Image (tube, grey):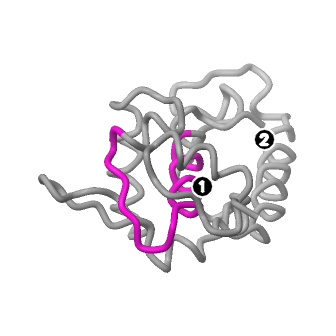
Amino acid sequence: MKLTAFSDVGLRVMMLLSGAPEGSKLTTHELADGVATPYNHVAKAVARLSGLGLVQATRGRFGGVRINEAGRRESVGHLLRELEGDQPMVECEAPDGECPLNHLCSLRGVLNRAREAFYAELDAVIISELPHSRQMGPVMVQLGMRPPQDALA
């Protein structure tokens, strides 16, 4: 199963915010730099994450994005279900999809069960478990922030 680029960006943003020092805010431009993704893509992901209640986004001069407690506790599986939506895995699942084998095909059911097994495996992983301090340190320094204390040990 391949994730959409939107889901990939959303996960990266959540990881970066989760690994940032507690209570810190990052601008959307800083997030874009930190996850090496164009600003417009990150802005769309931040808007969606904010709509899901996982991050707090504040506009203006002193604005920025920060992860909230719900975002830290969110499971990767649930987040991906939200970000991916009901993307068809094969063409015949699409509203305009046509396949002459539709009436005798059991592939859709198998693929849907496989997708749910994929998400179920990720349900056990919590966003705050993903970033490791030692890995986040260089990114935080690049963004002009102080790295997490245990990244320096």
Q: Which one is earlier in the sequence, the residue at label 1 or at label 2?
A: 1
Going 40% across and 66% down the picture, which residue do you hit?
Answer: 24
Quarter of the image with the N terminus is: top right
Mark linked to residue 105: none
C-alpha separation, residue under disc 1 versus residue under disc 2: 32 Å
- In the rendered image, which residue does mark 2 sit on? 108
> In the orientation shown, which residue stands out farthest toward the front?
153
Mark linked to residue 15: 1
Amino acid type at circle 1 is Met
Residue 31 horizontal/vertical position (percent): 43, 43
Going 84% across and 35% down the picture, which residue do you hit?
Answer: 105
Amino acid type at circle 2 is Arg
Question: Can residue 103 be seen here?
Answer: yes
Q: Main secondary structure of the magenta part?
A: helix
Going 41% across and 73% down the picture, which residue do you hit?
Answer: 23
Quadrant of residue 3 within the rendered picture: top right
In-front residue for pair 132/83: 132
Residue 67 horizontal/vertical position (percent): 44, 67
Q: Would you say residue 28 sits in the magenta stretch?
A: yes
Mark 1 is surrounded, within 10 Å at the Cα level, by few (under 14), some (14 to 19) or many (20 or more) other residues, namely: many
Element type at mark 1: helix
Magenta segment boundaries in residue numbering? 9-29
Mark 1 touches mark 2? (CB < 8 Å): no
Quadrant of residue 102 within the rendered picture: top right
18 above or below 99? below
Question: Can residue 85 be seen here?
Answer: no
Element type at mark 2: helix
Going 55% across and 53% down the picture, which residue do you hit?
Answer: 16
Q: Is residue 135 left or right of residue 38?
A: right
Q: In this view, does 49 lie to the left or right of 76?
A: left
